[in-house]
Amino acid sequence: MAGMLYLCATPIGNLEDMTFRAVRILKEADVIAAEDTRSSRKLLQHYDIRTPMTSYHEFNKIEKGRKLVERMQGGETVALITDAGTPGISDPGEELVRMCVEAGIAVSAVPGPAACVTGLVVSGQPSRRFCFEAFLPQEKRERTRILEELAQETRTIVLYEAPHRLVRTLGSLYETLGSRRISICRELTKKFETVERTTLDEVLRYYETHEPRGEYVLVLEGKPASQQEEERRAKWEGMAVAEHMAYYERQGMERREAMRQVAKDRGVSRRDIYQALLADTEEE
């Protein structure tokens, strides 16, 4: 019988966040595929896990992935761990999962810490609906495209950033999205964990005199409903009432229904729309 792949979440800072099941799976696996074997060795020693390790990272994910799949096809169990957090989220584990799925190999997650969720739940931002963007692209054109998409995103936005790129990223967000509310989560679960709940313009002023240190999770307010409403009304107010009516009638709305929708779009009464249409008719 074929073996299987376990995706084992590991602590993002505090070693006590390791689960009992993750420790057991790592001990029972035939091999542990680790993104950074040197970093992971400290974790394994802490829990007296002596399973052999092999490196699996961004630069060998295709070649090493094939070898791991062959081992699983031969009946071995592979446990995949990342530097910190859940494998497959913003790391090459995604590729190994895809290869296993294509090869018909069973994949199981051993859930645990994930920096994106940890940051979200302590941020104070709405958490029912959110999107995760990980690290913004470094290539200018792709970065601009993503930022423009985020400017229209209504859900809470979760990003990762390294200290040496933090100020640039905050500046790009401010230029494209304006001064939104943001929670700056730093060194989560570690000794010097901090969560600053502020705005983009305020935090940029802060980092003019403070050097960023540690790993960051940025939790950013989605596009505010008030801004959405203002933009929506501005769009319709720039259109003649008759043209606005025609827009809905072309979609199959009856005239009375279209009039009701136009009034709602413009924040006025249906009588106001009727009077405007009547005035247009008299002018003709």
Image (spheres, grey):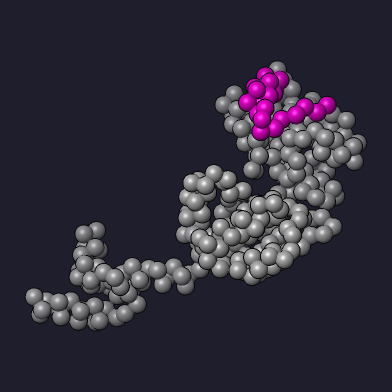
Residue in the image at 59% along x and 60% along y: 171
Placement of the C terminus among the 4 image quadrants: bottom left
Residue in the image at 47% along x and 59% along y: 152
Does residue 283 show up?
A: yes
Residue in the image at 79% along x and 60% along y: 193
Residue in the image at 74% along x and 60% along y: 211
82 horizontally vs 221: left or right:
right
177 horizontally vs 252: left or right:
right
Farthest residue to the top: give it. 74
Task: Judge by depth and name the residue closer to the eye, 134 or 125.
Answer: 134
Above or below, comparing residue 190 to residue 69 in the picture = below
Above or below, comparing residue 92 to residue 162 in the picture = above
Q: Position of residue 182 (x, y in %)?
A: 62, 65
Does residue 129 show up?
A: no
Task: Judge by depth and name the residue closer to the eye, 68 or 3.
Answer: 68
Q: Position of residue 192 (x, y in %)?
A: 82, 59
Above or below, comparing residue 197 to residue 71 in the picture = below
Q: Position of residue 279 (x, y in %)?
A: 15, 80
| Number of numbered discs overlaid on the protein picture | 0
Task: Judge by depth and name the residue closer to the eye, 251 or 53.
Answer: 53
Placement of the N terminus among the 4 image quadrants: top right
Task: Judge by depth and name the residue closer to the eye, 71 or 85.
Answer: 85
Farthest residue to the front: give it. 209
Which residues, given as a range, are shown in magenta?
A: 52-72
Q: Position of residue 195 (x, y in %)?
A: 73, 64
Residue 57, magenta (yes or no): yes
Above or below, comparing residue 71 to residue 194 in the picture = above
Q: Quadrant of residue 241?
A: bottom left
Residue 182, magenta (yes or no): no
